[in-house]
Image (cartoon, grey):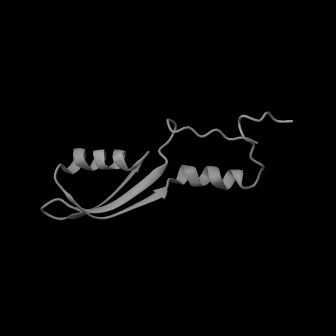
Amino acid sequence: MYIAFSLEEAPLYTFSAIIYDGNRQHLVKQDVSDHEAFETYLQQQYGCYVCLWCNKEPTQSVLDVIASTSHGALRNPAQPAS
């Protein structure tokens, strides 16, 4: 079984951050493809901010793909099935 997973289909990571915008702290979560995309999101939403803490985890969709493939054999897409 081969499961194709494309970067265009779904974001790979859930980023969480505690930021301070000059008035108060915010806990922010966003599903994006990389750290640069998360920083772009924060800049668009908050403008000037200080990031106090940041974490990156696989999104639930990535975890679901990993779980579903752990029950079957994976094939390299370059190698045809026999």
Question: Which of these two is toward me, 39 or 61?
Answer: 39
Residue 4, relative to residue 61: is it above or below? Answer: above
Residue 54, relative to residue 44: is it above or below? Answer: below
> Residue drawn 61% across and 52% down?
64
Q: Quadrant of residue 52?
A: bottom left
> Residue drawn 17% across and 49% down?
47
Residue 53, relative to residue 77: is it above or below? Answer: below
Query: Where is residue 9 shown, x and y percent of the image?
Result: 52, 37
Query: Where is residue 36 shown, x and y percent of the image?
Result: 35, 46
The residue at the far right in this view is 82
Question: Which of these two is toward me, 18 or 75?
Answer: 75
> Residue drawn 47% across and 59% down?
57
Locate the C terminus and report the quarter of the image it occupies: top right
Query: Where is residue 4 shown, x and y percent of the image?
Result: 64, 38
Please state the total of marks drawn on the protein image.
Answer: 0
Q: Quadrant of residue 29?
A: bottom left
Locate the N terminus and report the quarter of the image it occupies: top right
Q: Is residue 49 left or right of residue 68?
A: left
Q: Is residue 13 left or right of residue 45?
A: right
Q: Is residue 29 left or right of residue 66?
A: left
Query: Where is residue 18 shown, x and y percent of the image?
Result: 29, 64
Q: Is residue 12 left or right of residue 29?
A: right
Question: Which of these two is toward me, 55 or 9?
Answer: 55
The residue at the far front in this view is 78
> Residue drawn 71% across and 55% down?
70
